Image: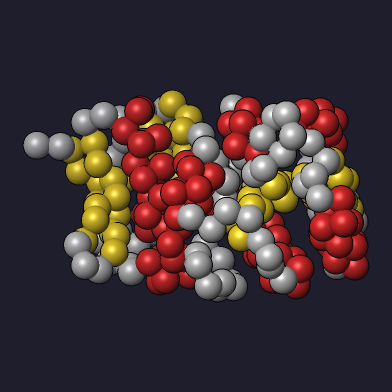
Amino acid sequence: MAVGGGKILVVDDEKKLAGLVKAYLEKEGYQVVVAYDGETALELFRQESPDLVVLDILLPGLDGLEFCRRVRLDSRAPIIMLSARAEELDKVVGLEVGADDYVTKPFSPRELVARVRAVLRRGRLAPSGEPAMVRGPLLIDRGRRAVQVEEEEVFLTATEFDLLAGLAERTGQVFNRRQLLSLSQDDYFEGYERTVDTHVKNIRRKLREKAGDWDFVETVHGVGYRFNAKKKG
C-alpha cells in the first residue's frame, strides 16, 4: 500500500474530470493511476493491484459494469461508480454487479474524496485477533474479513461484509437503513440509504447459494432489517 493512504485507480474517459479527481486524491496523499477506457483499466488493475477503484460506467469498449463483473470474479477491492445516469435502476444494477458506492455526476470532488476515505477506512478497521462469530452454519471472521457457510467461502464486497458483520454482532436487534449504515462507516452521505436494500439483496443471494435451507437477514416490514439465523420451514 502506498504511503499516504493507498493506491487508487481512476477510470473515466473524460480526461479533464479524471485529471481533477486525480489532483484532489493526490492532494490527500493517495497514489493515483488513471485509465480512459475499460480494457486499459483492466490491465492496470491487474498490474497495480489498487486499494480502490473510482469507475465511470459509460466507457468506450469495455464499459464500467462489465469491468466490475470481471474484477469481482477474484477481487474484493472496493469500487465507487461514477455516472451521469441518475435513474434508480442504473444504481441498482451497478451495486448488484459489485460496486460499493455510486456517485452521480456532477459531483463535488471533496465529497468524492470523503467517500473514498470512508470506504477505505472500513476495510482497514478490521480488529486483529478478534474471535470469529459463528451463527448456525455461518462463520464471520472480522480479522481476515472472510465469510464461510458450511466451511465454503462466500465472496462479499467490503460493504456487504461490514453490513453483515454489523448485523450479526447484534443478533435480533432491528436497524433502520441509516442505523445499519452507521455500523459500517463513520461518515454519512445523502443517498447511501437507498443502497442498503440492494446490498442486503446481494448478501442474501450469496449466502443462499451456499446454505439454501437457512435464512440469515430478516426484513422487519416498515422498519428495516435484523440478523436472525434460522432454518426455513
Residue occupying the point 65% across, 39% down: 64
Residue 224: name its quadrant: bottom left
Q: Between residue 27 and residue 94, name the one nearer to us.
A: 94
Residue occupying the point 42% across, 71% down: 178
Left/right placement of residue 156 relative to residue 129 reads left
Give the answer, above or below, for where 48 lies relative to 176: above
Q: Percent from the top left, x then y, of residue 126?
A: 60, 55
Q: Percent from the top left, x then y, of residue 91?
A: 50, 51
Q: Is residue 20 visible?
A: yes
Residue occupying the point 40% across, 71% down: 179
Residue occupying the point 59% across, 27% down: 73
Q: Is residue 166 visible?
A: no
Q: Between residue 229 and residue 194, name the one nearer to us.
A: 194
Color style of the picture = secondary structure
Taking the view exactly as shown, the residue that stands out farthest to the left is: 233
Q: Percent from the top left, x then y, of residue 221?
A: 19, 62
Left/right placement of residue 109 relative to residue 91 reads right
Q: Between residue 136 and residue 219, name the one nearer to us.
A: 219
Residue 173: name its quadrant: bottom left
Q: Percent from the top left, x then y, of residue 8?
A: 80, 50
Left/right placement of residue 170 relative to residue 185 reads left
Residue 206: name its quadrant: top left
